[in-house]
Image (cartoon, rainbow, N blue to C red):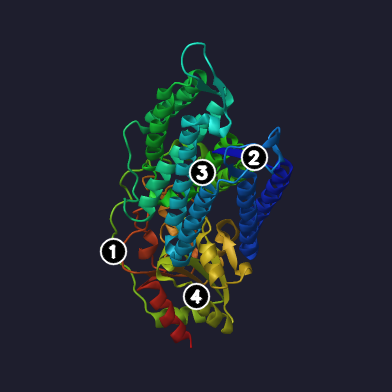
Amino acid sequence: MEHVTAGNSFAALAYLVAGVCFILALRGLSSPATSQQGNRFGMIGMAIAVVTTLVTHIPLLSGDVGLDGDRIASVSAFSIDWIAFLEILAAIGVGAIIGVTIAKRIAMTAMPQLVAAFHSLVGLAAVLVAVAAYLNPMAFGIAQMVIPMIGDPFAVINPVSKVEMGLGAAIGAITFSGSVIAFLKLNGNMSGKPILLPGRHAINLAVLATILLLVAQFAHSQDAWPFWTLLALSFVIGFLLIVPIGGADMPVVVSMLNSYSGWAAAAMGFTLHNTAMIITGALVGSSGAILSYIMCRAMNRSFLSVIAGGFGAEASGGAGGEAKEQRPWKRGSADDAAFLMQQAEQVIIVPGYGMAVAQAQHVLREMTDKLKEHGVRVKFAIHPVAGRMPGHMNVLLAEANVPYDEVFELEDINSEFAQTDVAFVIGANDVTNPAAKTDKSSPIYGMPVLDVEKAKTVLFVKRSMGGVGYAGVDNDVFYMDNTMMLLADAKKMVEEIVKALD
């Protein structure tokens, strides 16, 4: 079977249109108000890219085909290999069914680990493409056949293609194994606490340097052992880069793995001579890297330490131990909370992962409507890493139709807590923990947090006093004089508060 690339002019124009759609998608996704439109542009762009690739890479049976360079000059003499074409369509259909089924069934609380799982598949796809290109380079048009005077003919892969193949395979393998570890941590199959290996930074640097040397060796010699060795080491380094990272920093990890998956796709786009993959991969890679940089700045982390792995994981046990149940604390009821908020001039609501687990966003919106009826000014404070992936809380609040102009990021609202009557914290722990500002032994030290403790009254919704946040750190806010703990399922507690407001 031969793959013939048809209609280069048509393909270039179609891929250009798809690229513009992807850019518009990223622009739309930058704001909750335009996110649905951005998703539509993304779907349109991907549909154009997939259809164009199918049309311009037709599987043909061997026969008389009139070609002008890479373009088909005459189509009367060839026949389509329908078996191969139907196999491609069947694979697309199976993937579409799986994707639609997962999208319909997945809960918002499981969205972070789903994203990590999808990143792993992108990385694995890049690895498989690289392996296929190495095993059969003539089918990918990246080699020349050499016919020696003695011996069998053999294919010599272009040096540039070998570099692209090696880097694509390495980045894809790192993305795959790193995303698998991120999935296991986010899904609770592996502890969210950092797993610190002795001398891990030196080990990581040595392994990365070895991978680059193996890429150079593979480009120079085309021997089999450098390719397979760099592939194996890349799987290992992906694991080593992610295991030292604690749960509090996991949203940045998800963003960084997104960037890796983009660069892996771009590298494989060069191998496949596919402009759409190059454009899409570059957009995903660069946007993911920019988002990671922005989040690192918001968390007071070093961007370079993200790439090296193990950032934010140097701390030892000071505050990262068990909950301090023996300290005195005050417990309140839904009636108490309703009375305090009803008398307030301003209430700032701080949502966290507990709200997502309880699916309390809709009843929380109902509570804010009741407070507004009583003349209370209500705002939402969103931490950059609230939840377990970037934008997690924004998506949940948008799902509940919370007005966008009532939702504020940390840097825009943190100064208002000191003039706020009530800070209503629902399922957020690490992002409100003052230990990040005071305790150098804490694993979250240095991370900017929401200053909820400065409010006149803090209402803290939490299931029990025995649990700690995802970073495994107890929160001093629980035990402050101005804090009232509301111990219950977040959704049930808010429902009771709504009844009390009535």
Indicate left or right for 194 with 6 as reference: left
Q: Earlier in the sequence, mark 2 or mark 4?
A: 2
Q: Which disc is residue 5 wearing?
A: 2
Q: Quadrant of the N terminus?
A: top right
Give the label on residue 261, or none.
3
**N-terminal of the two: label 1 or label 2?**
2
Three-letter code for the amino acid on which mark 1 is drawn: Gly
Residue at coordinates 40% horizontally, 48% vertically from top-left? 182
Q: Do labels 2 and 3 touch, CB within 8 Å?
A: no
Labels 1, 3: front one? 3
Left or right of 294, for residue 27 = right
Tag 1 near tag 2, CB within 8 Å: no
Residue bearing mark 4: 362
Q: Label 4: state its secondary structure.
A: helix
Q: Is residue 91 visible?
A: yes
Calculate the distance from the C-alpha at mark 2 to the C-alpha at mark 4. Answer: 51 Å
Q: Are marks 1 and 3 in contact (CB under 8 Å)?
A: no
Q: Amino acid at mark 2?
A: Thr
**Of helix, strand and loop, which one carries label 1?**
loop
Q: Are marks 2 and 4 in contact (CB under 8 Å)?
A: no
- Packing grade of label 4 (10 A; few <14, some 14-19, many >=20) is some
Looking at the rendered structure, the secondary structure element under dot 2 is: strand
Q: Earlier in the sequence, mark 4 or mark 1?
A: 4
Which-is-in-front pick, marks 1 and 2?
Answer: 2
Q: Is residue 453 visible?
A: no
Q: Position of residue 62 (x, y in %)?
A: 58, 37
Task: Write down the residue under mark 1.
Answer: 466
| Tag 3 and tag 4, C-beta contact below 8 Å | no
